[in-house]
Amino acid sequence: MKKGRGRTSRIRRRKLFRSSESRGVNESYKPEFIELKKWLKERKFEDMNLTPARFPGTGRGLMSKISLQEGQMIISLPESCLLTTDTVIRSYLGAYIAKWQPPLSPLLALCTFLVAEKHAGDRSVWKPYLEVLPKAYTCPVCLEPEVVDLLPKPLKAKAREQRTRLQEFFTSSRDFFSSLQPLFSEAVESIFSYSAFLWAWCTVNTRAVYMKPRRRRCFSAEPDTYALAPYLDLLNHSPDVQVKAAFNEETRCYEIRTVSSCRKHEEVFICYGPHDNQRLLLEYGFVSIHNPHACVYVSKDILVKYLPSTDKQMKKKISILKDHDFIDTCWKKVLLGEIISDTNEKTSLDVAQKICRYFIEETNAMLQKVSRMKAEEIALINQLTLVETLWTEELKILQASAGILNNLQTAFT
């Protein structure tokens, strides 16, 4: 037998292949990360467990330098490293915020500080952190209108609503930005542009960790729960992991502990919450592959289209769906343990199959459209690939559902 052709060799190659799939390329040597590490060390933080790396599939993240055991501390970031409204109040913006009426929201204070510090460039003490933040984001508010048009209808509606709210938020904040003119030699309109504000809002919305609500008189009544956590916010999301994350009042550090183990040189994940892919894209700008929380939204219009036209309880069914997130005329009987009639069972399966077929056809059509646009709109290929991934994941759900429904229908007949 030739060397390297045996069973043991094949097993070893498979293990190496699986390992290479999850391993990242160390990026700690890059200038921006060297500067960030120096900056963090000055603030009493030096990480021994993790290192910046780039991974296939997830991009930039943090890689374990050691094997992490269940319950082990992943990261403990001192309060001095956190960017919160306390940071903003203690800064040159504090006096302007304190006297502004009506009071600013905590979110606006953070966004204003980020824009001002970004503009300061080398003069900003936060520069090492700002340098590793994304230069642009892929949340729907940042996507081109023709790309937003390709999103599933429920997400498209939410994306447009979010964009409108953000534009109104920016417009209503202009007077406060103007009050900051004494701090700058340039016109504030050029500093606090919509694009700069959008970048700052996305930074807070996608990267902030949760802090126990604080209440300051100089801020509005909106919850003050945001904290930007340099280095810690390099951790990517996985729906399959569990961690314990919170600010420790005793140690004055934001701490994350793993609930499960992680092997050396693998990517370390945290979980942003049990979100479906449409929610992940809307709030964070990415789609999770093989997301156990993924779902396909069925609108009221589609249900009305496929429910039997002779159904006299149509309005009641729609109302129940809206209020309780499920559709079934006999829902109360089911909860009480009564048996649904064979007729209702067969009708329900028929309706579900029709809806599933409709969505499969729509999804395939949208994937074809996205594919054509990728060939024509090279400049939008990254945005289009993101949308394509969302539709592909939804198609997987629909195809699996179609198989289950077919089996149920076969068993029923």
Image (spheres, helix red, strand yellow):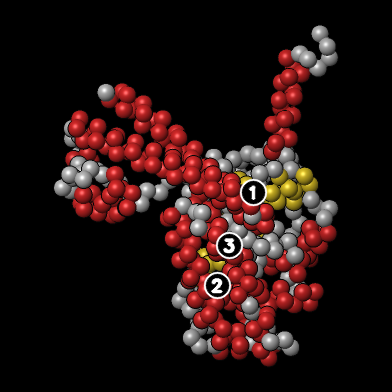
Label 1 SS: helix
Q: Does residue 274 appear in this view?
A: no
CB of mark 1 within 8 Å of CB of mark 3?
no
CB of mark 2 within 8 Å of CB of mark 1?
no
* Camera-nearest residue between 321 and 335: 321
Q: Nearer the viewer, mark 1 or mark 3?
A: 1
Residue 196, quarter of picture: bottom right
Residue at the image point whose x is 61% and y is 89% from the top: 179
Disc 3 marks which residue? 144
Q: Earlier in the sequence, mark 2 or mark 1?
A: 2
Q: Amino acid at mark 2?
A: Leu
Q: Amino acid at mark 1?
A: Ala
Q: Earlier in the sequence, mark 1 or mark 3?
A: 3
CB of mark 3 within 8 Å of CB of mark 2?
no
Label 2 SS: helix
* Camera-nearest residue between 284 and 28: 284
Mark 1 Cα-neighbour bin, 10 Å: few <14, some 14–19, many ≥20: few
Disc 1 marks which residue? 375
Q: Position of residue 395 (x, y in %)?
A: 48, 40
Q: Position of residue 240 (x, y in %)?
A: 55, 41
Quarter of the image with the N terminus in it: top right
Q: Does residue 171 appear in this view?
A: yes
Q: Is residue 217 above or below residue 253?
A: below
Left or right, 113 with respect to 161, comes to: right
Q: Earlier in the sequence, mark 3 or mark 2?
A: 2
Label 3 SS: loop
Q: Position of residue 129 (x, y in %)?
A: 73, 65
Residue at the image point whose x is 29% and y is 39% from the top: 351
Mark 3 Cα-neighbour bin, 10 Å: few <14, some 14–19, many ≥20: few
Disc 2 marks which residue? 107
